[in-house]
Image (tube, rainbow, N blue to C red):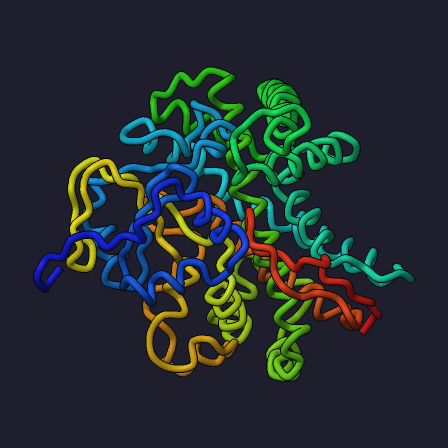
């Protein structure tokens, strides 16, 4: 906030119907408008006024004025997550519950989970190598990411986990949809799936209270420490949120990383030099065995994937007081979307080129927020990063992948980036 204050630029859209069509269909929707209106502009999407921002200055200004904003989600997300959900809370209620649920993703919890994750990577590698048919790798990544959170945290397995996954996929696909519960619509199906999910999660919570498996026992101490007499209904909605936090971003990141390696095959020899120096399964603590200090090229590859295809395309805030972002005045009551993908490609240099080496040679951007930022950064960030490291090393040390010719490798972006044809591959043992 260093220059002369400017009024908020606007596209002039009134109903936002055409803007919404562009938003869902055009991956360059935000970039085109940033080019025309600057790094801060307002438009309307189906009646909802939204302020889009990009760039380090605007985002830092937003974080610096965190007391003047609160969390916000579209109506479809608010409804499907539930009124008690951490994502729909603000102030002290949000902070207290975040501290409690965050214990499920703390370092001590990750150490507890990591042996099981290593075993699940090996099981997936065995499954892939035994397949004679083309494999939709993105689907396997989604099932793996869901199995990790459902098994290690909730203690589910077998039929219970599979049933939960089926309903969770229905629920997830409608998160960013038109919130009209017309019979047969994605949103109506998602509401029915949500009801079944909550019932199953209620049973999971009861089994945890009775000494069941998983990591849910970590919640009890946090509840007592925070002085939160959470009802079962409250906790169940937090479990639904942590399933999403520990699953969707991870599945997207894993699929996009494997897609990048298959599309840019010159990278595999570069990465292989580092993989040859690593041991699978890890000989010491799996949470640090392949961390950035020991596997810098893997970290650079992961960072570049998240720069080009962030698992969270953007995050929202709502102003409760007037604020100023990059010298543009934003009135109170406005919803702001931080456009991460557009921000990551904005600036000088070869930012439209996929080049992991930029994160090793000092030419990368200083601000990279693939899991959102501020006090509402994605709860599952640490688990996602651990899974990416373990999955990438474990699979690539054991399996050789070849892409099936003729498939569409373009990305569908909602709710998170994923290859449209499922990333079809053949797999052979190394």
Residue at left offset 64%, top offset 31%: 185
Residue 271: image location, x then y, percent? 61, 78
Residue at left offset 63%, top offset 64%: 410
Q: Nearer the viewer, residue 310 or 107?
A: 310
Residue 356: image location, x then y, percent? 50, 76
Residue at left offset 39%, top offset 30%: 88
Residue 92, quarter of the rendered image: top left
Position of 172 with respect to 322 (left or right) is right
Regarding residue 401, the answer to whether it shows in the image is no
Considering every residue shown, the one lying at the far left of the view is: 4
Q: Nearer the viewer, residue 207 or 419?
A: 419
Position of the N terminus, as image quadrant, is bottom left
Regarding residue 223, the answer to whether it shows in the image is yes
Residue 53, quarter of the rendered image: bottom left
| Relative vertical location of residue 53 with respect to residue 96 in this rendering, above or below | below
Position of 119 with respect to 83 (left or right) is right
Q: How many marks can you see?
A: 0
Position of the C terminus, as image quadrant, is bottom right
| Relative vertical location of residue 175 with respect to residue 279 in this rendering, above or below | above
Position of 223 with respect to 66 (left or right) is right
Residue 326: image location, x then y, percent? 19, 59
| Relative vertical location of residue 307 with respect to residue 92 in this rendering, above or below | below
Residue at left offset 59%, top offset 22%: 205
Residue 184: image location, x then y, percent? 68, 28
């Amino acid at each position: 906030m260093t220059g002369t204050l400017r009024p908020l630029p606007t596209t002039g859209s009134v109903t936002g119907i055409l803007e919404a069509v562009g938003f869902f269909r055009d991956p360059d929707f935000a970039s085109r408008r940033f080019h025309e209106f600057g790094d801060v502009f307002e438009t309307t999407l189906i009646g909802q006024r939204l302020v889009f921002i990009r760039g380090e200055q605007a985002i830092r200004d937003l974080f610096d004025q965190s007391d003047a904003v609160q969390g916000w989600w579209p109506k479809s997300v608010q409804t499907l997550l539930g009124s008690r959900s951490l994502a729909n809370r603000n102030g002290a209620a949000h902070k207290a519950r975040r501290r409690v649920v965050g214990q499920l993703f703390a370092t001590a919890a990750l150490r507890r989970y990591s042996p099981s994750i290593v075993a699940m990577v090996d099981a997936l590698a065995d499954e892939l190598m035994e397949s004679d048919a083309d494999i939709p790798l993105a689907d396997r990544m989604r099932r793996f990411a869901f199995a990790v959170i459902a098994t290690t945290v909730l203690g589910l397995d077998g039929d219970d986990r599979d049933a939960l996954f089926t309903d969770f996929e229905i629920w997830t696909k409608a998160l960013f949809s038109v919130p009209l519960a017309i019979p047969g619509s994605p949103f109506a199906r998602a509401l029915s799936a949500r009801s079944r999910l909550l019932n199953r999660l209620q049973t999971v919570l009861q089994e945890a209270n009775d000494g069941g498996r998983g990591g849910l026992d970590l919640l009890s101490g946090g509840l007592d420490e925070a002085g939160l007499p959470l009802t079962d209904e409250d906790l169940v909605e937090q479990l639904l949120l942590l399933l999403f936090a520990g699953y969707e971003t991870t599945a997207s990141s894993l699929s996009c990383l494997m897609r990048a390696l298959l599309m840019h095959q010159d990278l595999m020899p570069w990465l292989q030099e580092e993989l040859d120096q690593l041991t699978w399964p890890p000989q010491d603590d799996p949470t640090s065995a392949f961390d950035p200090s020991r596997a810098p090229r893997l970290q650079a590859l992961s960072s570049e994937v998240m720069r080009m295809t962030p698992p969270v395309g953007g995050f929202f805030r709502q102003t409760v007081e007037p604020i100023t972002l990059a010298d543009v005045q934003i009135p109170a009551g406005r919803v702001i979307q931080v456009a991460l993908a557009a921000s990551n490609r904005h600036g000088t240099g070869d930012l439209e080129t996929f080049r992991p080496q930029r994160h090793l040679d000092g030419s990368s951007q200083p601000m990279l927020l693939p899991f959102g930022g501020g006090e509402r950064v994605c709860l599952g960030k640490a688990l996602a990063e651990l899974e990416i490291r373990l999955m990438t090393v474990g699979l690539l040390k054991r399996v050789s992948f070849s892409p099936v010719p003729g498939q569409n490798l373009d990305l569908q972006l909602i709710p998170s980036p994923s290859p449209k044809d499922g990333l079809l591959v053949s797999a052979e043992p190394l």
